[in-house]
Amino acid sequence: MASHCDGDSNPTGSSLKIPEIKFTKLFINGEFVDSISGKTLDTFDPRTGEVIAKVSLGDADDVDLAVKAARHAFDHGPWPRMSGSERGMIMMKFADLIQENAEEIAALDTVNGGKLFILCKIIDIATASRTLRYYAGAADKIHGTVLKLSKGLQGYTLKEPVGVVGSIIPWNFPTAMFFMKTAPALAAGCTIILKPAEQTPLSALYYAHLAKLAGVPDGVLNVVNGYGCTTGAAISYHMDIDKVTFTGSTEVGRKIMMAAAASNLKPVSLELGGKSPLLIFDDADIDQAADIAFRGMFFNKGEICVASSRVFVQEGIYEKLEKKLVEKAKATVVGDPFDPKVHQGPQTDKNQFEKILSYIEKGKAEGATLLAGGNRVGQKGYFIEPTIFADVKDDMTIAKEEIFGPVLCLMKFKTMEEGIKRANNTTYGLAAGIITTNLNVANTVSRSIRAGVIWINCYTLFDMDCPYGGYKMSGFGRDFGLEALDQYLQIKSVVTPVLNSPWY
């Protein structure tokens, strides 16, 4: 039965698992503290919609306190003055502590974000420790260059940490995003004020605790819970923050750029929305293509920026592929993410749940054909069936706007040229996929699509060494790879005269 829940009207069944929540305050200057206002923020279990904890609610005053701590730690503290190898050793210890506490942290992201427990443990938590280790290994390899200049001059460049970094992360991958931002910044010698998403603050606070245990000096890593419109805005406008990095919606990305311009012209890196195309050609293996397309869209309940939400299938195999995808949707088990038999957990919060359902209704109203799903699952929590629409036109709302949920748009194309044109018919440019056995087709299409990541005969495969980021309204700047490290470094040129050298 499609999206079944073992016959229980409540998808969580009886396996509620609330881990002990140890850290609920702000983390500033190496200590857990209440917010200055004393206000708190409810954080919810999306399996039930019930409050599981109250966390301290930070605002501009708390951001200011955190910035003062980070500024002092950068200007006078040991972190940027340590050798790269010393920073790397502390980061390695941090990675060890994450692995030692993987079970507990994965449970926090599951109960707070609706993520599948087993995948969170083996993918998200493992990615966190790998990211720290990757940049720990790079920390002592930050080098400038020696320049032989003209007219009796010599010069060299220094790569120096940019300073105090404000990091604003989303709720869909709270662990992975935490370390995508903090690991290269730490390796570079920066200090950080991080705002987790208000929906999923629990693991970020736990990581702050582990950072202190690992030996990260006070003031280097600060975590301030709060809302985007207050805490996030305070970070973006702050005159003593040297850089802001953000992952989230294009709408908020615009606001951050405006704030940076209106304040101290701090540099900004943005990883924003996507409406990523997946082009499946006639020569593709049907079973492989169906697996890639389904995982590409429905992994993490569709709450992933690179989701293959526009699947273009060449007309020769369209009917077969459509049938396979519908079968997969109907076989998907939606329910408690702690249950190893479950394939898809709840959407992260009520607002996102209602937004996704409203997009499904728009799809129906605009004439798309609903092939599978489209309904809420159960009476409690934020569960939605994996949903597939056919007969989707490029100008429909569901084909243009990022839904950020388990809704796939299935479309047919004839020629490679048509597929390329329609794939590029979007304001976004985060990712794309190509499934074909023809090398010429793969090369031509990958060179023609304007997106930051192109997957060929695979999808959503990330690696520490592979830069990740977008084109167009999907933002700019890169996470992962050494390119990410460069975003937290300034280049300083030093020039001196060389007198009476025989080489000039």
Image (cartoon, rainbow, N blue to C red):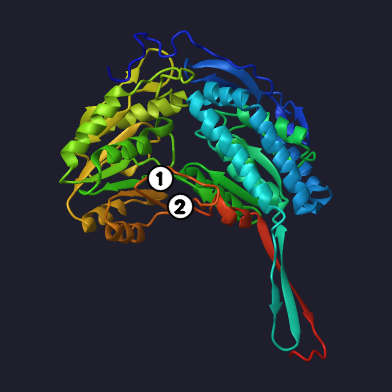
Along the line of sight, the residue nearer the viewer: 465 or 11: 465
Q: Secondary structure at mark 1?
A: loop
In the picture provided, is 284 more to the left or to the right than 45?
Answer: left
How busy is the neighbourhood of tag 2: few (under 14 within 10 Å), some, or many (20 plus)?
Answer: many
Along the line of sight, the residue nearer the viewer: 206 or 257: 206
Quadrant of residue 197 within the rendered picture = top right
Q: Residue at x 36, y 9 (%)?
A: 9
Residue corresponding to mark 2: 470
In this rendering, is residue 95 above or below 344? below
Cα distance in 3D space between marks 2 and 1 = 8 Å
- Specify which label sits upstream in the sequence, 2 or 1: 1
In this rendering, is residue 487 above or below 236? below
Q: Residue at x 72, y 47 (%)?
A: 88
In the picture provided, is 445 more to the left or to the right than 199?
Answer: left
Q: Which mark is residue 350?
A: none
Tell whether label 1 touches label 2 (CB within 8 Å): yes
Quadrant of residue 60 within the rendered picture = top right
Q: Residue at x 75, y 53 (%)?
A: 84
Q: Residue at x 39, y 43 (%)?
A: 459
Tell me the kind of residue under disc 2. Answer: Gly
Residue corresponding to mark 1: 274
In the picture provided, is 432 more to the left or to the right than 285?
Answer: right
In this rendering, is residue 379 above or below 445? above
How busy is the neighbourhood of tag 1: few (under 14 within 10 Å), some, or many (20 plus)?
Answer: many
Quarter in which the C terminus is drawn: bottom right
* Residue 341 in view of the camera: yes
Q: Secondary structure at mark 2?
A: loop
The percent coordinates of residue 237 (x first, y second) are 63, 47
The percent coordinates of residue 293 (x first, y second) are 32, 39
Tell me the kind of residue under disc 1. Answer: Gly
The percent coordinates of residue 380 (x first, y second) are 42, 13
